[in-house]
Amino acid sequence: MTAFKLLDLSKVPVPDVISSPDFETTYQELKDILIGLKEEYRDVLALESDPLAKALQVFAYREILLEAKINDATRANMLATATANDLDAIGARYNVERLVIQEANVIAVPPVAQVLEQDNSYRRRIQMAFDGLNTAGSDDAYVFHALSASGEVLDVDASSPSPCHMVVTVLGRNGNGIPDNNVLVDVRRYFGLSDDGSQVLETASKVRPLGDKVSVVAAQVVEYPVEAVLTILPGPSGEVIQQAAEDAVWAYVRDRHKLGYDVTQSGLYAALHQAGVHSVELITPTADLKMNNVQAAYCSGVQVTIGGVDV
């Protein structure tokens, strides 16, 4: 896990400005307003089939739609909830552009579509934008600039084993996470280094402070399989339960595929214990996988089988 601590945006409370539209409440409020203007309307509005009541229902529905649009516009302007082009607009405020992971190739057969950085990765870099306003002096700034060097970079750790020496550890986005040489070259060039990192380029780097020696290295990847046997309850389909457990495990291990993130047995048990599961026997891994800041765990495969039905 990288040394800096970013605010967990998923835990930011929903702003008070976002309302919870309710048709019945809005409709009743409109009726109360009209009755307040003229008491005789009470009996008329008691008849749901009356044209005046129908008109108020239309007004209430339109107000609900308007509130929903306001809620959507509010979320689109918040870093925690903005997506797609709305997130790009927020990134533009901080001069942080969405990275291109794969360029489009229209003449290829079949044509290759452009692949852009996903929202979560882009949102993280926007959140770190202030760390990139200056040279890469702090750990956070080194991480921000390394993440911005290439769309193939999934995670970064920056540490200083000795004064004026920074080691930037790069976890790749593809495969098991060990970055290929091209990714390391992109990061090294971003910091004004030669392709092999052994020399400083004559062109001054805009992000590497003068006097800092920067080493860009590949992350260490620890591969592991997940194998488990489930005992299920009578009734539910075994195939459905098995698929749900496998999907949950994949979601968990992909989320833990970052530098310094441990893979725990308790996390795997929680993922495996889906609705309809009576008990779980976790065969591998046999213990928690503890990662340091330059290591990332990578799941090489998930095998979940149904061992029997509890009776």
Image (cartoon, grey):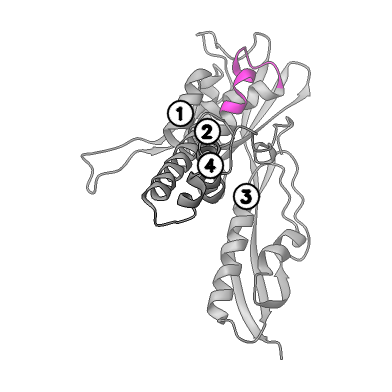
Q: Within the magenta stretch, is there residue 295?
A: no
Specify the amino acid type for callout 1.
Asp
The residue drawn where x is 46% and y is 25% is 89
- Does label 2 or label 1 sit earlier along the sequence? 1
User: How far is mark 4 from mark 2, CA to CA?
Assistant: 57 Å
Q: Indicate whether 11 appears above or below 195.
A: below
User: How far is mark 2 from mark 3, CA to CA?
Assistant: 16 Å
Q: In the picture provided, is 18 more to the left or to the right than 41?
A: right
According to the picture, the residue beneath numbered tag 3 turns out to be: 255
- Does label 4 or label 3 sit earlier along the sequence? 4
Task: Give the secondary structure at mark 3.
Answer: helix
Q: Please give the range of residues in magenta.
A: 126-138
User: How far is mark 4 from mark 3, CA to CA?
Assistant: 60 Å
Picture coordinates of residue 207, whole percent (x, y): 58, 14
The residue drawn where x is 25% and y is 44% is 111
The residue lying toward the viewer, choosing from 192 and 292, is: 292
Res. 122 mark: 2
Task: Give the secondary structure at mark 4.
Answer: loop
Res. 39 mark: 4
The residue drawn where x is 61% and y is 68% is 245
Neighbourhood count class around disc 1 (C-alpha, 10 Å): few under 14, some 14–19, many 20 upward: some
- Does label 4 or label 2 sit earlier along the sequence? 4
Residue 76 appears in the picture as rendered: yes
View extreme (bottom): residue: 311
Is the residue under label 1 in contact with that under label 2 (CB below 8 Å)?
Answer: yes
According to the picture, the residue beneath numbered tag 1 turns out to be: 88
